[in-house]
Structure formats: C-alpha cells, structure tokens
Image (tube, helix red, strand yellow):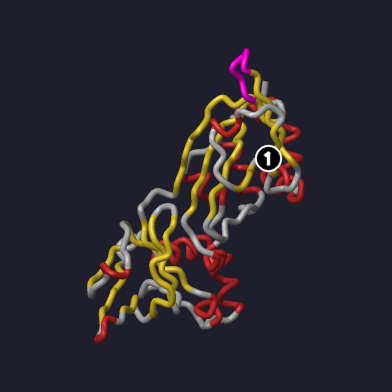
Amino acid sequence: MKALFLIVLCVVGASAYSHFNLTLLEIAKKYGLHDILVDLGETASLAQKLNESGQWTIFAPTDEAFDEMGHTFLQELKNDSVALEAFLKYHVVQGIVMYKDLQKNDMELTSVAGPKIRVNVYRANRAVTVEGCELVSVDNVATNDGPYTVFVPNNDAFNRYSNTTLQRIEGDVALSEVLMKYHIVHGVLWRAGMHTTYLQTLATGDKLLIREGFFGTITVERAHIVSRDIPANNGVIHEISRMLKPKDVDLIS
C-alpha cells in the first residue's frame, strides 16, 4: 500500500517575498522531506511558491510509495512540467490539518491543485487513509525555525528597481537567498525594543544597523519602518520602505 507522511508547514513571510523565490520545495528540502519528492519539486522549477505568510499541510509520499509508482511514471512526470506541478499541488492543502482533524470518515479537503482529497477512517484497523494511501507518520510540524524578526520591503521598495534588476534577483537563487537572509534576524524584536545597534542577520557575517534618531524615529540601514509589529507564527514582521542589501552585493537600479 502506498504510504504518506503528514507534515504541517508554517511559514513566516510576506507578499513582497515573491521577489526572493521562497518556495515550498526549498523549505521542504530544508526539513528533510523525502528525496524523490524534493527531486521532483526541483525538476518542477520550485513550482509551488510561498509568496505570503501561510500555513500548509503536506501529504508527502514516502520513497517506497514513489517506488511503487515505477521509474517510467516518475520520468514521465519529470518530462511534463504541467502534470508535475499538478501532481505536487495535489499533495498540499492550505491551513493546518492535524491527525485529530482527520477523524471524520469520508471528509474532503481541497488541494492546492483544486480537486478534492478524500479522507477515510477505519477505526477497527486504527488506520486513516488519504485517497486510499495510509498515513504512516503524522503531526510532523515543521516551521521555518525561529523566532525571527523579518524586515519586509513593501511594493514601493521593489518599484525603485528596474524590471531587469528584479528579474535578475528572481533568476539567481544564490542572490535571492543572500538578500532574503539579510532581511531576517534571530529573535523577536518589537518596535518598543529597538535602539541604535547592529543586529546579526541570517546572512553569514552581515549585520544590520538599526538607528534611533531624534523623536524616537527608527531606520533600518536607510529604510524607514512603514508598518510595525505585525505578529507572525514564528516572530514579528516590520514593513520597510527600501530593500536591504549587504555592502558587497551590487544591484543596478
């Protein structure tokens, strides 16, 4: 029988981060989802983008389940980007769905792909199936660690750059990762706790300068805080007026 892992994924982010290509499959890889699932996601060019804060539940096939599908089927998936994207999205539903929530027989969940997913409960056998595939490991909660403070550029911040520059960012995975990490620091820092200091970012060796001016104004590098103290599942978000970048990163505006 094909088997599934039930994985709940909670993401701290914001809509502007679509420019940084933060994707479900990148996070799936980080949390050690099954090799074949991650490989398919990479083949799909990281098909399922997470471009907003969100909570997701993944019904992840085990590698053994993929083996049952056969090499030919997997190769056909890899060669058909439309079918592959639909296949991946069919295994994801929006929101948190824990094992305790799957105890109603014949309940249906809506996949990100659109079609419904049917859940069946067989209490005599102590089994729960999703489209006939038995859940073998449940309630694996994966967050993108934390707690974090995330400084998210607003749309005006990105509009400062040309389409060519934004396309370069989106097309360069390494650059996207550096920029994304440079906007994130460890710990929860609310506006009330900010003062002039340097904060270590997730980008190795790079620090952000937080400056408190007269009358209590706060800037992050040269960016102003447009909207502050937005609670998130794993920390806090502050919307800022400019995109931040390490000194050794050159972006042509």
- Height in image: 12 above or below 9? below
Judge left or right: residue 108 versus residue 33.
Answer: right
Judge left or right: residue 110 versus residue 205.
Answer: right
Q: Indicate the secondary structure of the residue bearing disc 1.
A: strand
Does any portion of residue 67 appear in the rendered image? Answer: no
The answer to which image quadrant residue 77 occupies is top right
Residue 232 at x, y percent in the picture: 44, 57
Residue 11 at x, y percent in the picture: 49, 52
Q: Residues within 10 Å of mark 1 (few under 14, many from 20)?
A: some
Number of marks in the image? 1
75 or 90, which is in the foreground?
90
- Height in image: 140 above or below 226? above
Quarter of the image with the N terminus is top right
Q: Which residues are magenta?
A: 123-128
Amino acid type, residue under disc 1 in the picture: Leu
Residue drawn where x is 45% and y is 63% of the image: 180
Magenta stretch contains residue 166: no
229 or 1, which is in the foreground?
229
Residue for badge 1: 109
Residue 163 at x, y percent in the picture: 61, 78
131 or 78, which is in the foreground?
131
The answer to which image quadrant residue 103 occupies is top right
Residue drawn where x is 62% and y is 32% of the image: 61
> In the image as oriented, which residue stretches furthest toward the front?
104
Residue drawn where x is 39% and y is 80% of the image: 224
Residue drawn where x is 53% and y is 50% of the image: 26
Judge left or right: residue 129 versus residue 196.
Answer: right
210 or 181, which is in the foreground?
210
Does any portion of residue 225 appear in the rendered image? Answer: yes
> In the image as oriented, which residue stretches furthest toward the bottom?
214
